[in-house]
Image (cartoon, rainbow, N blue to C red):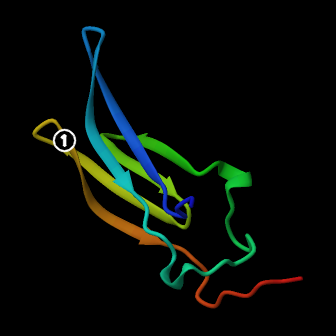
Amino acid sequence: MRSPSTAALFLRDRGLSLSEPGTLDGRPPAGNENDGCLASCVDWYGNSRPLFVRGRVFALLGYEIVEGRVEQARIVETRRLNFAPAVLQVLP
């Protein structure tokens, strides 16, 4: 079964040698609700997008924006914002 959560995997290139500093992970919706794509869906931005802004790292994951930073060659989460609709309604 496919999981509704998402993740952004980060890779580091050092002299044509790749390593994995880690991931920023999305959380599955509470109760596994399906909103019928009322406010967000993969068809308008894909399932995840990394953003690199002025030394900060963000991952757009479903209804969340997850911020991370690199610490000791690993990426770690610093905070997250969930912008899922407060009341989920499925329209016909």
Image mark count:
1
| Quarter-of-image position of residue 90 | bottom right
Q: Residue furthest top?
A: 15
In the rendered image, the quadrant that contains the C terminus is: bottom right
Label 1: how many Cα within 10 Å (few below 14, some 14–19, many 20+): few
Name the spot of residue 28 as percent of width and height, x first: 48, 70
At a point 39% along the width and 41% down the height, the residue shown is 9
Amino acid tagged 1: Arg
Depth check, front residue: 1 or 3: 1
Asked if 85 appears above or below 45 in the picture, the reply is: below
Q: Is residue 38 above or below residue 57?
A: below
Please report the residue visible at 34 percent of the width from the left and 56 percent of the height from the top: 67
Q: Position of residue 36 (x, y in %)?
A: 75, 74
The residue sitting at the bottom extreme is 87
Residue that label 1 marks: 74
Location of residue 82 with respect to 51 vertically, above or below: below
Horizontally, residue 68 falls left or right of residue 84, namely left
Residue 53 is left or right of residue 62, and the answer is left
- Which quadrant would residue 35 be assigned to in this image? bottom right
* Furthest residue in direction front, as rendered: 1
Q: Secondary structure at mark 1?
A: strand
Residue sitting at 15 percent across and 35 percent down?
73
Q: Position of residue 84 (x, y in %)?
A: 57, 76
